[in-house]
Image: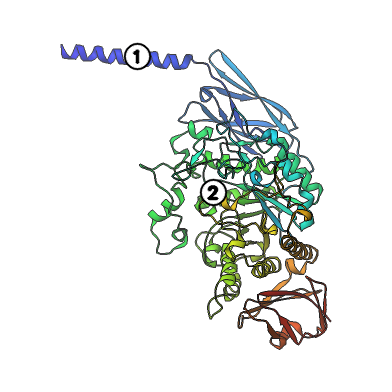
Amino acid sequence: MYTQFTTRIKIVAVVVFLAGLSAAMAQSARIQRINPTNWWVGMKNPNLQLLVYGPNAGSLTYTINYAGVKLVKAHTVENPNYAFLDLTIAPTAKAGTLTIVGKRGGQTLTQPFELKARDRSPKGQGVTAADFIYLIMPDRFANGDPSNDKFPDMLDTQADTKNPYLRHGGDFTGIINHLDYLKDLGVTALWLTPVIDNDETLKKEGPDRNQAGYHGYHFTDHYQIDKRFGGIAGYVELASALHKRGMKLVQDAVYNHISDDHWFFKDKPMKDWVNVWPTYTGSTHKEQSLYDPHGATADKKTLLDGWFTPFLPDLNQRNPFVANFLIQHAIWSTEMFSLDAWRIDTYKYNDLDFLNRCNKALMDEYPKIHLFGESVVNNPVGQAFFVKNTVGFPFKSNQPGALDFVLYNAFNDALNQRFDWDSGVNRIHQVLAQDDVYADPNKLVTFLENHDTDRYLSVIGEDFDKYKLGVTWLLTTRGIPHWYYGTEILMKGTKNPSDAEVRKDFPGGFPGDKENKFEAAGRTDRENEAVQYVRKLATYRRNNPVLQVGKLTQFVPQEGTYVYFRHDASKTVMVASNTGDKEISLDTSRFAERMNGFTSARNVQTDALLTDLKMIKLPAKSALVLELIK
């Protein structure tokens, strides 16, 4: 009796299962997305993996019939709403629209996919020490088109310049409107904080506020440019406007994480699409575990796989489908928007092998492109681990450059510490003295501040003399200098109570602004002096290769003075700075090895001629940039 009862239960269970399976199979399939959204013929790498998404898209049998294009394999994964199609595109393939055909029983779906011809617009040009990069947060720079400030069909429908935590309406049109201002300042390249779609709910960023993703680091759709900035068409227009002026475009990559509002997080292709923990686990943020010969494996895992915040899921780049998606998006973006370089966000939190693979793919396709990542470290050896180096680490990074946080900290120490044996301006000397750990220190990107730090002017106590000292070092030492928007007009602020305090609107960029600091008439005398100081040095650097690729020779600081030379076969430039509170007369006999044969000099900032180089007067907290003359 018991056996018969059990058998009936099993039969019922099988019937129910088959009925459910039949119902699921009866649901029609649809294709809602294909990523990348298009590709190009004539790329160096013939391989392409398409992500196909839609209800039951993974249950379709796919075919492609297009000359020069072969469907090598169709992958199914845990989630039946996904398929991944491996294609090869032969060198003989022509531009056009192929048809992806998916069949399932009696249902046939067709989806067009465009293969474009590559255009001849400049792209992948790279940035070098000849460039001066200007960092803009598009939402906070200038609003050229108020009609795109907000949209009712987006998760965040708010825009209010009076609220520091919401979107303000800056866009590509606003940037284009001020490109001539930037070029006149000496800028040669623009780096924008991310412009990819951030269609997300407001995020809880404190006990008493919700914050919009105005900064752009919370991706929700990799293949859409946020329409509040101007969308894909607006970004293409910006790239074109830059290149017509001989300027370059740097895109901000975020490989490490996505928003929890991202469409493929809400419906993940597979469980390990993101790094999963039993309970929420944040990153340690301690990069030492990556190169520590005594380090614990558990610490390394938590650094790399821990989440940045609870609402920023950490992508699992060891998953080959994730890796392919991110790498192909980087190449697609470079080709689509004629990008010249990439700044890579949160570099140290990414899987190391993935980073090398992604870097290589970009450099193979665009040999001149420059890549520089953000790794917040405070010692040269730690920084060298993430770039091509001479240290001999077991892991060999292929990243050519990085943001130079070590020199950034040294700049601040030099301006804020009392000069002593190991402090003050000695810090700059010490950092540069260790440049031998890098394969090419001239590919490091130097800076005084950025969108994640306190404003430079506030860090130095709003001291204008110190301001000019730091600007002088930035624009005359080795590396690729970058600038944060508004520093030239003495914008200030600290991250207390929030990051929004260092991301304020550029005055004059928004309707209703009482002051327009893009124009000299709208600036104070001191602000105009700052703009002129930056313009003079940036222009001189742009026009003189000696400050770009000339050798750097520095002398040990003494009594708060720091002297170095940039020199090549045709020119020698002397930079002499006094960080002390009293004027000094600098005896130059100590610098004979670099000054012998020179009898006079031109002051680069003032164009004044110095006819006696034996003793040089240095006012308190000042720097001289002298082009030496024989």
Q: Quadrant of residue 126?
A: bottom right
Q: Position of residue 118 (x, y in %)?
A: 75, 39
Disc 1: CA contacts within 10 A as few (<14), some (14-19) or many (>=20):
few
Kindly identify the residue that appears in the image at 71 percent across and 72 percent down: 551
Q: Is residue 590 visible?
A: yes
Q: Is residue 114 above or below residue 23?
A: below
Specify the farthest residue to the front: 514
Give the residue number, with chain letter if any, for mark 2: 354
In the displayed structure, does residue 94 sit left or right of residue 499? right
Kindly identify the residue that appears in the image at 66 percent across and 61 percent down: 443
Quarter holding the C terminus is bottom right
Q: Is residue 89 above or below residue 296?
A: above
The reply to whether the C-beta atoms of the residues labelled 1 and 2 are less than 8 Å apart is no
Give the residue number, with chain letter if any, for mark 1: 16
Q: Position of residue 302 (x, y in %)?
A: 41, 51
- Identify the element where label 1 is drawn: helix
Q: Is residue 40 visible?
A: no
